[in-house]
Image (cartoon, grey):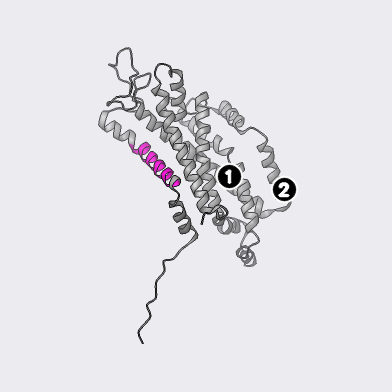
Amino acid sequence: MSAIPIEVLAGTSLWRNAWHRLLRNRLAVLGMILVGAMVVACAAGPGIIYRATGYTYDFIPKDSGLVKSFPPSLTHPMGTDIAGRDLLARVLLGGRISLMVGIIATFVSLIIGITYGATAGYLGGKIDEAMMRAVDVLYSIPYMMIVIVLLSLFGSRSPLNQLFLLFLALGAVSWLTMSRIVRGQVISLKNQEFVLAARATGVSRRKIIFRHLMPNVLGPVIVYATLTIPNVMLQEAFLSFLGLGVQAPLASWGSLAAEGIRNIAVFPWQLIFPGVTMAVTLFSLNFLGDGLRDALDPQTRKM
């Protein structure tokens, strides 16, 4: 009797299936490609420009005459600013700062929101009630006003200290929604069999929260983080536009737009290029976030 060939099937998992669903979403894939290209350009672009031309974000030419702002050309693809500095180098450096603010502030908000929401959801009872009422009180306060007050009171003349304060201020007020999302997920999971088994074997509450419950709420966390980054970047741009964000000599897309709006009637490219670059990045992040939501949320899955 001849042996019957057995077909070996490739293993699958929730994350593998989500990845395949994400790849079928054209807008999400386009957003992922554009975001990746923007990150690479902002990381490597200023160094390449410096080695090729000697231009940096703060390079001011000495022989440019009275008129220092030149329109886009082969030498300066995005033109120059009012001081004669290459706008492409400044836009790429501004992308570093804007992306850094979005990622780090979102990371701070995730740490606070996940810890707070998971603790409240798992402990339940009066502790959960008190913790979530505190969240409701904070929700009633316009968080942008809190950020403005924090930056006004503790702002520093040092650009690096101001940037660090911006990370903390934006992250410390962006965790409220994440805490509610994580709390709801934990409440739905804390009576599952794997949690009950961990309790029966004497596992501490801290280990149950961080080792057993946290990995099971990563899907909504990743989706919300992807959608929070563009929101934080918009907030940073707004603060920089008001003069409370990134300080010179550093630059962000918001501060570049603030400089460009003053000269829009004469030198429109100073506003167009930073604005378009930021808009494309924000659209791409939102497309990617929507695609991740569709891929990871079984309620919205398209079969």
Question: On the rendered structure, is 289 left or right of 49?
Answer: right
Nearer the observer, 131 or 161: 131
Mark drawn on residue 129: 2
Main SS of the magenta part reads: helix
* Screen quadrant of the N terminus: bottom left
Compared with 264, 55 (above or below) is below
Q: Magenta span covers which residues?
A: 28-44
Please name the residue shown 61% across and 43% down the image: 177
- The image position of residue 62, as x and y in percent, is 29, 17
Res. 247 visible in picture: no
Q: Quadrant of residue 73?
A: top left
Nearer the observer, 8 or 128: 8
Query: First in sequence: mark 2 or mark 1?
Result: 1
Distance CA(mark 2)–CA(mark 1): 18 Å
Spot the residue most to the top: 66
Q: Secondary structure at mark 2?
A: helix
Mark drawn on residue 112: 1
Please name the residue shown 34% across and 22% down the image: 80
Please name the residue shown 34% across and 27% down the image: 78
